[in-house]
Each structure stands twice: as structure tokens, then as C-alpha cells.
Amino acid sequence: MHLDISTVKESGAYAGYIQKKILFLSACTGCLIVLAFISVGVGSVMIPFSDVVQTLVYHTSGNAEMIIWNIRLPRVLAAIICGIGLAAGGVVLQSVLRNPLSSPYTLGVSQAAAFGAAIAITMFGAGTLGRLVSDAIVVNNPYLVTICAFLSSLAATSVILLVAKYRSTSPEVMILVGVALAALFTAGITFLQYFSSAEQIAAIVFWTFGDVGRATWSDLAIIIAVITPCLVYFMVKRWDYNALDSGDEMAKSLGVNAEQVRTVAMFLSSLIAAVVVSFLGIIGFIGLVSPHMVRRIIGDDQRYLLPGSCIVGGIILLGADTVARIIIAPAVLPAGVLTAFLGAPLFLYLLIRRNPS
Amino acid sequence: MILSVQDLSFRYNSHPVLQDVRCEARPDEIVAILGPNGAGKTTLLRCMNAMLRPKTGTVMLGQQDILSSSRREIARSIAHVPQHIEPPRVTAFDAILLGRRPWIGMNVHKNDILKVQAIIEQLHLSGLALRYVDAMSGGELQKVAIARALVQEPRLLLLDEPTSSLDLKNQHEIMQFIRSVVHTHHLPALMTMHDLNLALHYADRFVLLKEGRVFAAGGEEVITAKLIAEVYGIPVTIQRWGGRSVVVPHANADDSMGSPGIPAGR
């Protein structure tokens, strides 16, 4: 069969519809850039917006430059990159499991990564204890922490894949799997704490709070090196995720190897969760909230949903961290606390809305 | 282009689902695959596009050996409309555009957009193009699914119970839609069906499956009261009405003994 297109004209209405989506993505990108500049200036030492721009653009010297380049900028970039990564992991998991409640956090993958990282720090000596609460854990072997976190999160992912294969990927089943895995790995962390000293317990508890302020430039380099290829892969596979959104049968009939796409997507989402948890601790709900916010505006088309969710994920985590820096200044709240405050009500709303009966 | 299925057998674990199935389909022809629940209709359809890998047998589409082709090559030759469509929140245009997946690489080209536009115009779906499919009725959703199948530019159309969740009006509308598509694009179409009367009304040939085997195959002449009683286990009478055959099932076995008012069946 061949479709003749010699007399067909491109639909202006569809082109306009696509333009709106591109406009939305551009507006979100603009918001993220503006928020980044604002965020660099916000904290216990407030730096005027003009000084921030001057320091970043003209590399002026002084206190402002030291604070911006050594403290604020790595923090802001870590929030953006990790927000993007967690949102990408969430939107892809929601697609391949066809489950709107999926995210690395709700499926227990983040908790598994935290358990693996805690083992690396407490048992393999990958982290040392600092003297102050603010630097309670110093990761001196980030590779070992990331590898342990990743292996542990892979164990959780394997359980999810097995359940998905032999049972179903229905929201109820997946959430119960997530509850079980989160409980299991949280129990594992508690087990480690039981055999730890009081200082170690305090350190582990502090470390599991998601805080973007811990990232250094070298941490950031590893985070970017892991997350960027995953994002590129996700974007290359966006058509496959679109096909999977219509069900496995439809995806296969469109030439998609559904099982392979699902396995690789879950593997990479676990890797993202592992690297974020290794360096920043557990930051929940970004992967759940941002896809839902974007989906309501531009729909399920992964060509736009994926980048849109990533940008909004970056905005949410950066926004949460910015607020966390000023809400009880000069003290700084971990951003993970604020993302949980934002995400938990939405999670409940989604659960209630899914099954009104 | 002729579809030829030869000696197809499929087992699920150790349970034989299909055994030595043979059937054919030619262009401009609708072949209805009939049979009771569990006869293997959907499994046969899934084996035809290698979604399930049969234990033995061949599926040839012209010169193409389907079972040894790659998934993308199969998707370029065979379009499949599944029974259950899970509509995501995308417009009908984007849902149909997804049918170009076997042909596109990284990006959609202008020609892909134009092909979607062409099929929308041919099937008179312009009114639905920018509506979200998750808010569509069953009939509209089925039309979009068929349009998506056609934009694959297939050489064979497989439809799994395309009217199963539709009301009477929509059942006939969709079947007329399929018939017009098959004739316009000179495609062979195979569809599994439960409604014998709908099949008799629209299909050109029939394959009756029972317990995974072809019980009978051919034109309308193979659909007899005796055969249906044997395949479905319920007595029926076949009446002629308006020049067409109509299957009238008997509510209980006693009805088959010649109730007043029911003419003798074939």
C-alpha cells in the first residue's frame, strides 16, 4: 500500500498546535534560566541580581565571586541537573510501566540506592564523618558509593521487572511493590544504624535527607557524566515510549521490542536515581510531580513531555532549594523536605482521582 | 499480494493452542476468523505478525517470510489493530502519526506529516484530528486505530475483534469503514470476530477454528447450521433475509426441533 501525498497540503492547525508546545517548552526554559540567576544570589548572604550577572558574565573578583563559584553555582547546577534527571527517570518509568504513579521514589528504587550507598559509607569506608552536622558525611570514594547504590537499586528494579512480567504493571500492584521495597530497604538502613555509633546514626540520618548543597564541582562532573547520556538515550527512544503508551501489543505491532525498551529504560532510571542518591541523598516526588504537571498542559506525546518534564523537574528542585535556603535563614533546610511537602499531597490526589469509587 | 499461512502450530507452555492451521487472504478481501472463546483466534492473529513465535509453520506475505523478518520489517508489511486500545492523552493526529514509527528514524519528516494528513482526509477524520483520543467514543477510537494502521502503509491488515465494544450502529459503521478501506487500498484484511451475522454481512471468506484447528474454511457456503452447532455447541437456524444469511441461535435445545415460524436452515 502506498499513500499518495502529491495533492496533500500540510495542516496549518496541526502546525499551530505543535508551535504551542514548543512555545511552552521555550517559556519553561526561560523560567529555569531566570530562576537560576535569582537562586545564585539567594541565601544567608544575599547577592544582588546585577552582581550575580556581573560575576558570572565578567568574572569579577571579591567575596561575591567566591560565594558564587564555590558554593552557590555548584548547588544551583546540581539542583537543575538532578531535577532534570529525576524527572526524566519518572516520566520514562511512567511510560514503560504504563503507570502514572511510577517514579524512582514511589517504586522504592531511591530507597534501595540509599541503602546501597549507606553500606558503602558505613561498611566499605567510602565516606568519612565530618565534625560538624553540616558536613556530617564526606564522600571520599564517590565511585564506590555510586556503584553500591546502583547495584542495590538494580536489585529493586529486578524485583519490579519480575513482578511486571509475571503479575501486572497496574498502579495498585506497582505501588504495593514500591511500599514493600521501600520498607525493605529502609529496614536495611535501620539495621545498619543499629550497629553504628551515635555519631554514625546522626550522619546516616542527615545524609538520607536530600540536600543539593553537598555537591562539589567534581561530584557535579560525575552526575552530569551519568545523567547526560541517559537523557540522550531517552530522547532517541521517545517514539518507542509513545508506542508503549498505547500498550505492549500496539508497540510490538509498530516494530518496538517492548521488553527490551522497558528493561533498558528501567535500568537507566535506576542508574540516575543511584547517582542522585549517592551525592545528594533521597529527593522524592520530583519524578512523580513534574511529568504530571507537564502532562496536564501538553499531553502524553513523549517528544514534548520528556523535555518538558525535565525542564519543570529542574525548576521544581531548584525552586525548592531556593526556598529552603531562605525559609529559615540563616539555617538551610534540605530540599528533599520541601519536595516531599509538594509531592505527597499530589500523590494522594492522584491515588484518589484514579479510583473515585 | 497474497497471505499464505501453512501448518502453523503454537503451544502455550505445553498446551497446544494452534495445530496445523492453514489459511489464505487475497487483496480486496476480508477474511473473518470465527470460533468460540479459546479457539485460538487471537493467537492466530498474533502468530501472523510474529508477535507470538509459532512452534512450526510458515507465514508468507507474497515473497516475504514473515517469521524470519525483523520486527521493523514486519511492521512495515503488516498493520495490526489490537482488541484493547489503551488511549494515551494525545491528539488523533499524533496517534495516527505513531503509525509512521516503522518508517522514521530520529525525526519525523514532512512526508510523514503529509501521509497522516492524506489518510485523515481520505477517511474523513478531519473533525477528529486535533481532539484528544482519551476523550473519544469507542467508534471514534477504532477509526483512529484503523487510520494509524493504514499510515503504516501495510500490505496486510489484521484486526482483532474490531467491533467487540461497540453498539449496533457503530459496529456497522466500523465494518463499512473497514470494507471501504480494504477496497480502496486493495488490501487483504483478516479479522477475528464473535458476531456471526456481522461476519456474514461483511466478510468475503471465513475460517472457523475449533480447539486450535481449522474446522472449516471457505466462502459463505461453509457456514451451515450443522457446522455452527458443531463448532459453537449451540443449535442454530440459518435464515435468508434481504438476500443475506442470518444466523438465529436457539435459546434452548428444544427450539432446534423445528419451532413454528422458523424456516428450515441450510
Image (tube, rainbow, N blue to C red):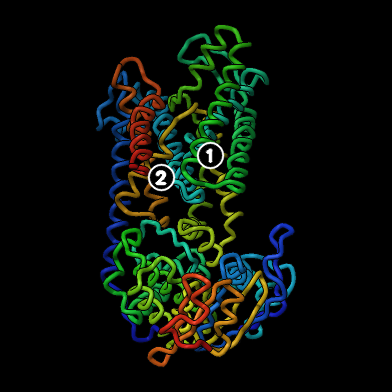
- The residue identified by callout 1 is A272
Q: Nearer the viewer, residue B234 or A296?
A: B234
User: Which numbered disc covers residue A128?
Assistant: none
Q: Is residue A334 above or below residue B111?
A: above
Can I make out residue A102 in this image? yes
Residue at coordinates 54% horizontally, 80% vertically from top-left?
A: B156
- The residue identified by callout 2 is A310
Cα separation between marks 2 and 1: 13 Å
Q: Secondary structure at mark 1?
A: helix
**Residue A271 horizontal/vertical position (percent):** 57, 39
Q: Which three-letter amino acid code belongs to the residue tagged 2?
A: Cys
**Residue A32 horizontal/vertical position (percent):** 32, 41
Residue at coordinates 55% horizontally, 19% vertically from top-left?
A: A138
Q: Nearer the viewer, residue A338 or A212?
A: A338
Give the mark nearest the N terminus, 2 or 1: 1
Q: Secondary structure at mark 2?
A: helix
Q: Which three-letter amino acid code belongs to the residue tagged 1?
A: Ile
**Residue B30 horizontal/vertical position (percent):** 50, 84
A8 horizontally vs B246: left or right: left
| Residue B180 placement: quadrant | bottom left
Q: Nearer the viewer, residue A86 or B5?
A: B5
- Residue positioned most to the bottom: B243
Mark 1 belongs to chain: A
